[in-house]
Image (cartoon, rainbow, N blue to C red):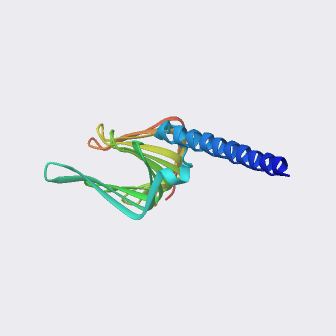
Amino acid sequence: MTLHGTHRVIDYRMIKSRLFWVISAIFVFVILIIFNYTENSVKMFPSLQTSSMKNLYLKHKEGDKVKWELSSDKAVLPLGNKEVFLESLVVKINQTPEIYLTSGSGIYEIEQGNVMLNKPVELKIREAKFATDSLKWNSKEELITTDDDIKLSGNSFLITGTGLSAKVPEQQVRIIKDVKAIFYR
């Protein structure tokens, strides 16, 4: 009987020893994973890489003069990007007469200071309104452009065409092609 009891003690010690080595191996494996961890291996979901704000308001100044202002109901600011995605925005260009650009959505390019406006877009100067699908405000060149179809309407006229180039300081507006005009009395 002593032999059998010793045999059981040996089996128990072997099992205990194997269990110790298996747990030790798992522990070493986990330690190696932790030491080899890098931030580059972490994948973040896009929704966690952005910030947003409501009622964004920006002023672009040159010297003491406010050249233009931008307001938006909502702004999404992706981390590391040079663009701000905007919803329901208005760009007010401060000159005589004042120019208002409104849009359902757009993008503000931070480094260039440009604003891309998307459908629907409206440009207002005094009583005249331009309507188009997209528009770009180049703040450095003070230039408003589009390649899309446009419709210019006022109290006594309607002008349609494709493409627009407006030099703000010179107050020159040019419809590029396919110009049609109707004048009312």
Evaluate whether residue 1 shows in this view.
yes
In the image, 154 versus 10, the foreground residue is 10
As drawn, 57 above or below 167? below
**Residue that protrudes farthest toward the front in the picture:** 2
Say if residue 180 shows up in the picture.
Answer: no
Q: Tell me what residue is drawn at x 70 percent, y 47 percent.
A: 13
Q: Residue at x 47, y 40 (%)?
A: 39
Q: Is residue 109 left or right of residue 6?
A: left
Q: Nearer the viewer, residue 77 or 90?
A: 77
Q: Quadrant of residue 178?
A: top right
Q: Residue at x 14, y 48 (%)?
A: 63
Residue sticking out furthest to the top: 177
Q: Quadrant of residue 22?
A: top right
Q: Position of residue 85 (x, y in %)?
A: 47, 51
- Residue 100 position in % (x across, y down): 38, 57
Residue in front for this viewpoint, 91 or 98:
91
Number of numbered callouts drawn: 0
Give the image location of residue 67, x and y in percent: 24, 51
Q: Residue at x 13, y 53 (%)?
A: 64
Q: Quick check: 127 left or right of 105? A: left
Residue 166, above or below 64: above
